[in-house]
Image (tube, rainbow, N blue to C red):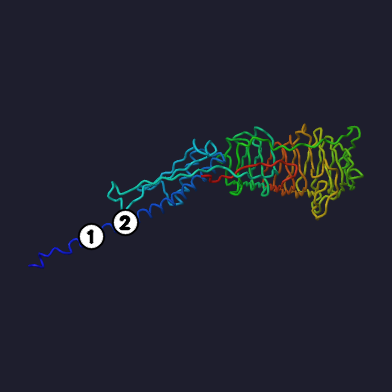
Amino acid sequence: MRFLREESGQSLLVVAVFMCVVGLGFAAFALDVGSMFRQKRMAQAAADAAAVAAAKEKFVGNSSSYEQAMANAIAKLNGFDTTLSSHAATVTLSTPSTGTFQGAGYVQATVTRSVQTLFLSGLPGGKANMTVSATAIAGGGVSSPTCVCMESSSAADIFMVGGSKLNAQSCGIVDDSNSSVAVYMTGSSKIDASTLATVSTTWNTAGNINNNSSITPTTTIIQGITSSCAPTMPTPPSFTPSSCITDPGNNGSAVTTAFTAGPSTPTGSKCYNGLTIGSNSTIDTLNPGIYIINGGYLHFENNNQTVANYGGNGVFFYLTNGATLQIDQGSNVNLVAGGNTTSSGGTASSVGSSYDGILIYQDTSDSSAMTVAGGSNLFMNGSLYMPSAQMNFSNGATNTIEGGLVGQQLIMSGGAVLNATASAGQTSVVYTNPKLVQ
């Protein structure tokens, strides 16, 4: 009975129970805090990725709905699904109006989700709301040299159909059109470039890239550029029209004998009222130098299919008074501008500093369309400056142009393939990739 009435040691029991309760509370609190920190890190990663994804959509000119859809998709990939029936995340996009990074060029993504707790389970629902934000912008200052420049201000400057391909992996394509159809592609056509830049702010891939056509994911699309891509044109060579001679390859009778054309020295010039190369399978020689084509065509015919047209190294053609370039189906053309590398690895003769590096310059007042027809095998090392002309490549032509391409419009059809590289005379587009700033 005395043992039952003994009270000594009861306080120790109370203290032990209290310590257990407090210990369990601290353990639960530690678990909650650890879980919250982990959830916050995950939420921050989701917000960062969502902000960059939305900035990318803004950068290429897509609508706010595209921005939101991409932000939601990227957040879901990072564990924050906005479509769940419970514990769904919320991704909110906004334009920051305060702080260091503010204005229309920035996108702020805010990710919110309720988090189940242990220690706070006594609160209504046992949940705590967690909110994190991130801000992204197109920033970075990357320079892309231009190799294809189309100068029409209101048309579909680049029009590609029938499986045509435009390759400019080491440089960019600039389209000065402000039209919503500045670039149009259909029928499995493809663009692969470093950049594709348009003056237009209303053009986008929706409705303009059709029927299995594509722009490679590595091509950075830039909209709303403010400067023209047009390079400065050289001063035209002087000539006296009365001194221009008749086309030796098409003088009104069948030409069956090969001839040599051009000046006697690489820096000299000679004027023709049209010039036809390769007529009736002749292998004509083009001396190095400056060629002035005063009206008519600079015409490469299709009969010389087994060998490249000889003598095309170190040449500069100036086309004026309605003259234009025509390369027939099946022709085999090899032309190299003054000072450039030939197909065999040598260096072509200089034609003078004003024209070295330029292969064809069609007068700015001459709007006659250039045509490269199907099946031709074209190698040109030099720029083609035809700023007022439409440039047509068609029907399976495989064309390598080691230099800039300048025109009003580029029309490609029927499986035509164009491989272009940058020219020193061209401008560069300075653009910025979407990146996280805060």
Name the side, left or right, on which 1 lies relative to 174.
left
Q: Amino acid at mark 1?
A: Val
Tag 2, which secondary structure?
helix
Residue 90 location, quadrant: top left
Question: Going by the picture, which residue comes out furthest to the left?
Answer: 1
Closest to the camera, between mark 1 and mark 2, is 1
Identify the residue at image location x=74%, y=41%: 371
Instruction: Measuring from the top left, give residue 287's x and y in whole percent.
Output: 88, 47
Q: Residue at x 81, y 53 (%)?
A: 307
User: Residue at image x 11%, y 68%?
Assistant: 3
Q: Earlier in the sequence, mark 1 or mark 2?
A: 1
Residue 41 lies left or right of residue 138; in this view the side is left
Identify the residue at horizontal 8%, vertical 67% (top origin).
Answer: 2
Q: What amino acid is at disc 2?
A: Phe
Vertical relation: 308 (above or below) 137: below
Where residue 267 sits in the image (x, y, percent)? 88, 43
Q: Which residue is mark 2?
A: 26
Judging by the rendered image, the residue that carries numbered circle 1 is: 15
Instruction: State how far apart marks 1 and 2 are (Cα).
Output: 16 Å
Give percent across and percent down for residue 324. Answer: 79, 38
